[in-house]
Structure formats: structure tokens, C-alpha cells
Image (cartoon, helix red, strand yellow):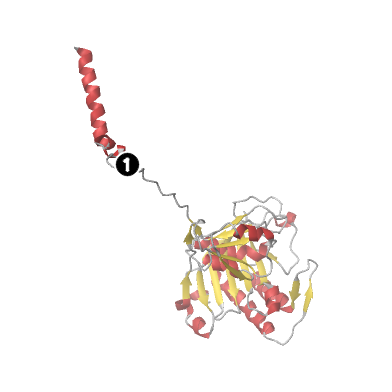
Amino acid sequence: MNSDNTTFGKFSAGSTAIAIDDVAALAKAAGDKIMEIYESPEFEQKIKADGSPLTVADLEANKIICDGLRKLYPAIPIISEEAKNASYEDRKDWEHFWCVDPLDGTKEFLKRNGEFTVNIGLCDGQGKPVAGVVYCPALNPPLMYKAVKGDGPPVKEECDAVGGAAGYDSFKTIQPKVFSESDSGLTIVASSSHNSPETEAFVGKYKTPTRVSKGSSLKLLMVAEGSAHVYPRLAPTMEWDTCAAQAIVECAGGKVVQYAGGDSPGCEPGQPVRYNKPNLLNPFFVVYGKVVIKKAPTKKKSVAFGEEEASSGPLSNPAVLGAVVVGVLAVAAYFATV
């Protein structure tokens, strides 16, 4: 993840030049610290005011990321799950901002199932994700996903001793599945820890779907890389939970759209999820790969034995019909003059 080795992911946010690999290096450093704590016999944890768990790994990773972003890109402000964020009055005119979840999937971290990620997203002043990095430190091998709007499809990099040493030879571009919602056997991924009656009703509209449960941003990544078709999140999330992965889904050609329900004010069903709202709570949303609309097959009219189809006569040919019409008009004109 050395930005000197490639032209991929080099762009500007206003007057600030950004290299996505430098951002990925911060996610990797945070992930390394998380794994150091994850593999220790015990670690400090507590419950936040909203009832969600907080560990020393969340705080250590947040410090690495936020300190690093401020050093590299001092002009761009930060929204982070584990920081005191600016009021909406102070942030409503931001032209760009980072949206950070230093440890997405703390419950999975505590369960020690490996389904957690490090998320760093960048949004523009309209609240649209323009770049994202998601690092999955506990997978085997660890994986880094990176995307920048307008710079081609996202890439997935293996970050173990083998893949990491291979540098950019270990990069693979990713793309979502192309499908119709009327297809049977679609793979629907849902949360491991936050199911809901609304989710069950949503999944129930598909024909014999395959259900998969995952934690953290891994669900969005599964849609982005084509290992799942749809991810409905009809339960509460915050902006930092989804921003980075939404950039990856959208760069791949998928979409993350709002869905009716939930407590987020101003929900616009069918519109892309947006960021830096007065309330940082996300609306319900659904993540799709590349959805196509299938046309219903046309039915051929049945013809009784011994009959000829009406469409099979010579006048069914547009050219023949046109010539007949011209001839009739010419004859009519001739007799009108005699």
C-alpha cells in the first residue's frame, strides 16, 4: 500500500491532493492494533450511553486513524463514531469530510468471530460518498477494499505476508452480480446481530432465496464483489457504519438506496443514502448489485388447424403495405382529374 507504486486512487478534494493508498495505510495500521488487542487474553470494554459496546480497540484504532488523517489532510474535517463530533450548524457547510468507523462490528469483535472492519469514507459537500477504504483484518487472508469515484472499479487487495509482498500484483477489481429481482435463488445477506420483522418481510418477497448472515460492512462488500445480490438493512445504523462501503458498492456499479421505515427524518425511498445530515442516523436502506428489468415473453397467437395466421399474409409486410397504399392513392388521383 505504497502510493508511490501506482496512479490508482490519486485525486483531489477541493485543493487537497489525496492518495487512497495513504488512507488505506492508516486503516491497515488501525487494523493491526485491533488484531493485537483481539488476540490478547482479555481487554477493557464498557457500554456506551446508547447501549452499544466500546472496547479499548475502538479507541486505539480511532486515535491512529484520526491523528493520521489530520496530519495528512489537515484541511478536511472528520466525523467519527468514537469522537465528539461538530454540531450540524458547524458542519453543514463542509465541502468535504471524512466519515470514520474505527471498528465496525464491535459486537462481532467481542464474539471473536472475525466479522469486523475498519471503515474510512470521504464525502463531498452534498453528502455523496466519493472514496472509501474498508479493511477486514481478521479474514484469512486479511483484505483491503479501496474505491475512488471516477477511477474505475474498486480493487481488493490481499494483505497477508504473501499478498502484501506481491504489492499491486495482488490487486483484483470487483463487480456486483447482474440479476432481476424476479430470479429465483438469489443470495440475500443480512445482519448477524440486528435482524427485524421488516427484514423478514422483505426477504419473503423473493423466490427461494439463499440466506447468509454476516457482521459489519462485510455485507455491503459481499454485494459489491458479487457474492450476494441484495442486502436489506431495515434496522438502525449510523452514517459511519456505511459511508466507506457505500463508496465501494457504487464504484462497483451497485446502489445503496433509502427504504421506507425507521426513525431517520427526511427519508426519501429509492434515493441514494446521503451523509452529514442534521441527525447522523441512517434511514433504512437496501443494497443492490446490478438490477435489470426482465421483459415478459410475448405470447404467440394460437392458430387452428387449416387456418393461416393473420400476420402471415403479404399485407403484414410493411413495405408491401406501403406500396399498396401509394398505388391506391395514385389511382384515386388519376380518376379525380378525368
Considering depth in this image, is 201 or 259 the residue closer to the camera?
A: 201
Q: Give the total of numbered labels.
A: 1
Instruction: Point out residue 324 in the picture as x, y percentages from the top left corner.
Output: 24, 29
Quadrant of the rendered structure where residue 142 is?
A: bottom right
Instruction: Point out residue 299 in the picture as x, y percentages from the top left corner.
Output: 39, 46
Considering depth in this image, is 100 or 328 the residue closer to the camera?
A: 328
Dot 1 crowding, Cα within 10 Å, few <14, some 14–19, many 20+: few
Q: Answer with left or right where residue 70 lies relative to residue 311.
A: right
Residue drawn 67% across the image and 69% down it: 101
Q: Answer with left or right where residue 124 lies relative to residue 318.
A: right
Q: Answer with left or right where residue 137 lies relative to residue 326.
A: right
Residue drawn 24% across the image and 34% down it: 320
SS at mark 1 in the image: loop
Instruction: Point out residue 269 in the picture as x, y percentages from the top left corner.
Output: 62, 51
Picture quarter with the C terminus: top left
Instruction: Point out residue 206 in the picture as x, y percentages from the top left corner.
Output: 55, 58
Farthest top residue in view = 338
Quadrant of the rendered structure where residue 220 is?
A: bottom right
Vertical order, 197 against 338 (above or below): below
Residue drawn 57% across the image and 73% down it: 24
From this viewpoint, is residue 75 visible? no
Amino acid type for the residue under numbered disc 1:
Ala
Residue that numbered label 1 is attached to: 304
